[in-house]
């Protein structure tokens, strides 16, 4: 579905572990058993307005399910939002409903 915060449409995607080993494991698992779903509890949220805080991000996504962790990625130098973050839900089923 479409998600909006402060009038801005967010880019919400599954946050799948990156890197050769994880990617390789995932590919092999899918090749061996195509029906095997990789259970992902974490989502990437892009397109965040610069003013959105971690608290607001968690508050928005908490209406879909219980949140274990939520972060807005910040620029180390400027301490400003980089416009994206991550949400980790307690249940992978929640991610499937987004």
Image (tube, rainbow, N blue to C red):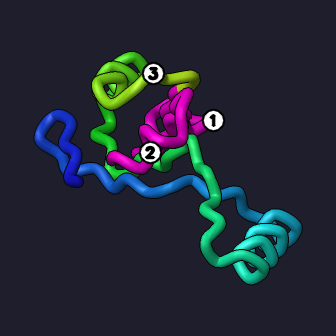
**Of 90 and 87, which appears nearest the observer?**
90
Task: Tell which circle, 2 or 3, labels the residue nearer the N-terminal end.
Answer: 3
Residue 60, above or below 16: above
**Of 35 and 88, which appears nearest the observer?**
35
Q: Residues within 10 Å of mark 3 (few under 14, many from 20)?
A: some
Residue 14, above or below 51: below
What residue do we see at 42% from left, 47% from top? 45
- Check contact, mark 2 vs mark 3: CB within 8 A: no
Residue 14, above or below 60: below
Name the residue furthest bottom: 31
Name the residue furthest left: 7
Task: Tell which circle, 1 or 2, labels the residue nearer the N-terminal end.
Answer: 1
Which element carries disc 1, helix, strand or loop? loop
Is 42 within the magenta? no
Q: Position of residue 83 (x, y in %)?
A: 40, 45
Residue hosting label 1: 76
What residue do we see at 57% from left, 25% from top? 69
Q: Position of residue 9 (x, y in %)?
A: 20, 51
Residue hosting label 2: 95
Q: Which residues are magenta?
A: 70-98
What residue do we see at 77% from left, 71% from top? 29
Residue hosting label 3: 66
Q: Residues within 10 Å of mark 1 (few under 14, many from 20)?
A: few
């Amino acid at each position: 579905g479409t998600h909006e915060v402060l009038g801005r449409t967010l880019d919400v995607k599954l946050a799948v572990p990156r890197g050769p080993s994880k990617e390789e494991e995932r590919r092999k698992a899918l090749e061996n058993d195509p029906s095997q779903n990789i259970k992902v509890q974490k989502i990437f949220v892009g397109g965040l307005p610069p003013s959105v805080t971690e608290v607001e991000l968690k508050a928005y996504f908490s209406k879909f399910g219980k949140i274990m962790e939520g972060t807005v990625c910040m620029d180390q130098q400027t301490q400003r939002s980089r416009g994206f973050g991550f949400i980790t839900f307690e249940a992978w089923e929640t991610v499937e409903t987004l």
